[in-house]
Image (cartoon, rainbow, N blue to C red):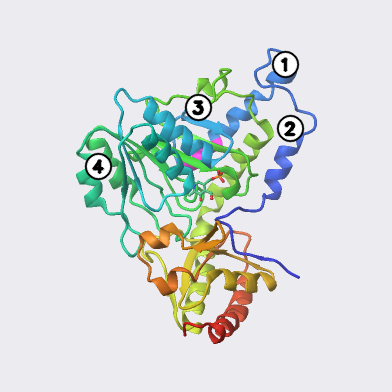
């Protein structure tokens, strides 16, 4: 059965070029970049090239502003815990109600240790309540962490405006860019962003590598103590093959950005329009005006997202649901709940997320199968 993979916000396939570039570091070039001898030390220059490639994709002025980590979650933890603990006075921690657990987790960790935490609302389209942010920012220096783009809906946040407000009141601004990097153009050097997280496996590099952009002058207390790797910000012998892979993946993503914004977006739009037209009771979640080009999140009244997913899976179609199955009960997604999506559709939401590897045939496959699945489930639904 042909697999139709439309779950690229969960993870992406490793690009062939990336795998090829990593291989020498898994075979012949296995030295330690910190070694004094030539054999080990020669790997260091490849790490520095990767640093330049990552910096170029996000538009950082200086590659030294990039710290390699093990994943997006580690980057977020380093920024939030490390950033807050490095500030002179305990900051007010601000975040939104629609963040990934890798942001809300470290924010709650700080709250448990006495930091004041404010979680900002979003409206029914998933847009941040900027006026409340402004009001709360006045309360004192903050460490604010707001995502660049939401993983479930693709909604893009106004990071420039958010950063400006946070800075106006002396705070530090971190953005979780895990879903945005490589999908939309960005130039962090020209934005009021102090730290930005990214993750390799969301942009065709392997799982287990990420990076944190830390603007020159921003203080961060390391989470992992030990050697002086990564200028003392993250101890541990560098994962050379994965760092090399991440670097190349960033370079390729930069080259394909235009494609993401045209071909990928066109496929996403065709899928979305087709579903809304052919499936009664289907509605779009999120802000159509400010969304990632690769993501759509659609609710289907009166049916469970999990049931749709299982039936799609049966046809070889991989998507994802907005809700997570927690301790045996089907908990609706915290993102859709924060957007106050109506009760009858909050359980029935499906996310389709594209990459440059998708084709028009993938869209055709969903448009052939999904309307039949929705109709069958509606017939079985006790709520209709
Ligand atoms: N932040 C967002 C918005 C994500 O979507 C994800 C992964 O799904 C993460 C952080 C965590 O990244 P990683 O899997 O590299 O730890």
Question: Taking 240 as reference, is 292 left or right?
Answer: left
Q: Where's the N terminus, which quadrant? A: bottom right
Q: Earlier in the sequence, mark 2 or mark 3?
A: 2
Image location of residue 314, percent across then percent down: 69, 72
**In 3D space, how far apart are the residues under numbered discs 1 and 3 (Cα atoms)?**
30 Å
Q: Position of residue 189 (x, y in %)?
A: 38, 36
The answer to whether residue 356 is magenta is: no
Which residue corresponds to mark 2?
25
Tell me whether circle 1 and circle 2 mark residues in contact (CB < 8 Å): no
Q: Distance of mark 3 from mark 4, alpha carbons?
A: 28 Å
Tell me which residue sits at (66%, 69%) in the image. 313
Q: Which mark is residue 38?
A: 1
Which stretch is magenta? Answer: 53-58
Whole-angstrom CA distance, mark 4 to mark 2, is 44 Å
Q: Secondary structure at mark 3?
A: loop
Of labels 4 and 2, earlier in sequence is: 2
């Amino acid at each position: 059965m042909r697999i139709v993979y439309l779950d690229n916000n969960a993870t992406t396939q490793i690009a062939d070029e990336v795998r090829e570039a990593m291989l020498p570091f898994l075979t012949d070039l296995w030295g330690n970049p910190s070694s004094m001898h030539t054999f080990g030390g020669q790997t260091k220059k490849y790490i520095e090239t990767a640093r330049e490639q990552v910096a170029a994709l996000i538009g950082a002025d200086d590659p030294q502003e990039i710290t390699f980590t093990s994943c997006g979650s580690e980057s977020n933890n380093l920024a939030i815990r490390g950033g807050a603990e490095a500030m002179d006075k305990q900051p007010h921690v601000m975040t939104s109600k629609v963040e990934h657990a890798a942001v809300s987790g470290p924010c709650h960790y700080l709250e448990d240790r006495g930091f004041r935490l404010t979680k900002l609302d979003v409206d029914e389209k998933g847009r941040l309540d900027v006026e409340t942010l402004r009001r709360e920012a006045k309360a004192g220096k903050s460490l604010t962490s707001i995502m660049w783009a939401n993983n479930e809906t693709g909604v893009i946040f106004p990071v420039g405006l958010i950063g400006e407000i946070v800075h106006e009141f002396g705070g530090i601004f971190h953005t979780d860019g895990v879903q945005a990097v490589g999908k939309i153009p960005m130039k962090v050097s020209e934005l009021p962003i102090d730290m930005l997280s990214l993750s390799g496996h969301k942009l065709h590099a392997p799982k287990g590598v990420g990076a944190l952009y830390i603007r020159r002058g921003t203080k961060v207390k390391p989470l992992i103590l030990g050697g002086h790797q990564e200028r003392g910000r993250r101890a541990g012998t560098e994962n050379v093959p994965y760092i090399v892979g991440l670097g190349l993946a960033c370079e390729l993503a930069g080259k394909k950005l235009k494609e993401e914004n045209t071909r990928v977006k066109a496929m996403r739009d065709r899928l979305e329009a087709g579903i809304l037209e052919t499936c009664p009771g289907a509605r779009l979640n999120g802000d159509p005006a400010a969304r990632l080009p690769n993501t759509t999140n659609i609710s289907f009244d009166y049916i469970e997202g999990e049931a749709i997913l299982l039936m799609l899976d049966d046809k070889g179609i991989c998507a994802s649901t907005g809700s997570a199955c927690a301790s045996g009960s089907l908990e609706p997604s915290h993102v859709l709940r924060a957007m106050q999506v109506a009760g009858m559709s909050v359980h029935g939401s499906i996310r389709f997320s594209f990459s440059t590897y998708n084709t028009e045939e993938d869209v055709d496959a969903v448009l052939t199968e999904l309307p039949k699945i929705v109709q069958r489930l509606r017939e079985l639904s006790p709520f209709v």
